[in-house]
Image (spheres, helix red, strand yellow):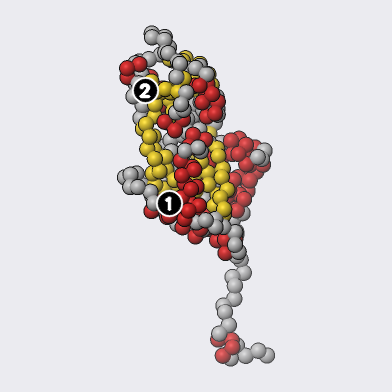
Amino acid sequence: MHDDSSPQAANRPPPLPSHQPPTFDLELLRTFLAVVSYGTFTAAARHLKRTQSAVTQQMYRLEEQVGSALFLKAGRSKRLSPRGQQLLHYAKEILSLNDDAMWSLRQGAGHGLLRIGSPHDVAETLLPSVLGRLRRSLPEVSSEIHIGRSPELMAALNEGRLDMVISSREDDALEGFALSTLPTVWLCAAHFVPAIGEPVPLIVGDTASIFFRFALDALDRAKMAWRPACTSSSPLGVKAAIRAGLGVAARSTHLLGPDMRVLGAPDGFPKLPDITYFLWIRPHVANTLAQQAFELLRANQPARGGARRGAPASSRRQQSRLREP
């Protein structure tokens, strides 16, 4: 018979509970964040390259794990239930810790890689300066560059698939600082002459773009009529249409080329707001390489009064106020 009063028994760890709490499936949490980021199961499925029914089934499984509904219907979109809002914070923290631990361990094994995202508009202007500073400060680090639309890039950053993102969008769950503030201007071809008294021939990019909103707001305030002269979901298509003289477009001066000119008050066009581009990272990131690179870039950036930090963990939520291509 075993004597439990022995010194060895006294040092024995307590027995594990017979029923362990359930463990979250990380893939379900990633899908959950995608639905929150894109607003609908259909859009999330397209982003994840899955069927809508697969995404729906994943969310049913997650709701079974949580024991409560995570979404409420809001027209064609989904909004989070109170329990879904609570899970959103935990999902970001869990995935962030998982991804940061993986990247930190891989970095320790000699994999020095930074995944950086940039929108098309600044891929030839702001992005090279960021990459140049990284090369000078961290010459041993490799970069993986992703060029795309800001909504997708910011979602990838929140989901841990990117380490840093340049964007004019703002998100209270992220930490960032201002890289550049530039005027938004009316651009046209150098040979283009706007017709007086006629609707403005507007070159329309993505209708969710901040530039499209700037243009419509300014034209509405000035009581100026407009017509769609050309539409393109690509900034390269917008640039080609401008150079061809098809009309005018509201863009940042990053897009201004030698064969273009700016229309202003003398031409009868209203003033447009400035636009600020930020460099964003997930706060409290455990990936030491990403944090080191971010801090080096911030330390070398002239003060602009535009630094932003993520909200405290208890109040983090996705706040996508600005959109751009």
Q: Residues within 10 Å of mark 1 (few under 14, many from 20)?
A: some
Residue 55 relative to residue 300: left or right:
right
Residue at point 35%, 21% (across, down): 264
Residue at point 55%, 86% (across, down): 10
Foreground of the two, 61 or 195? 195
Amino acid type at image mark 1 = Leu
Residue 252 relative to residue 236: left or right:
left
Give the distance between the C-alpha atoms of the residues marked 2 and 1, in whole angstroms. 35 Å
Image coordinates for residue 272, horizontal then vertical, percent: 36, 26
Q: Quick check: 173 above or below 211?
A: below
Foreground of the two, 253 or 175? 253
Foreground of the two, 137 or 285? 137
Residue 275 relative to residue 69: left or right:
left
Residue at point 56%, 90% (across, down): 7
Residue at point 46%, 34% (across, down): 323
Of callouts 2 and 1, the N-terminal one = 2
Q: Residues within 10 Å of mark 2 (few under 14, many from 20)?
A: some
Please give the residue where the numbered disc 2 appears in the rendered image.
218
Query: In terms of secondary structure, where does tag 1 sit?
Result: helix
- Can residue 105 be seen here? The reply is no
Amino acid type at image mark 2 = Ala
Please give the residue where the numbered disc 1 appears in the rendered image.
297
Q: Are marks 2 and 1 in contact (CB under 8 Å)?
A: no
Q: Quick check: 259 above or below 31?
A: above
Query: In terms of secondary structure, where does tag 2 sit?
Result: helix
Image coordinates for residue 189, horizontal then vertical, percent: 46, 20
- Can residue 256 be seen here? The reply is yes
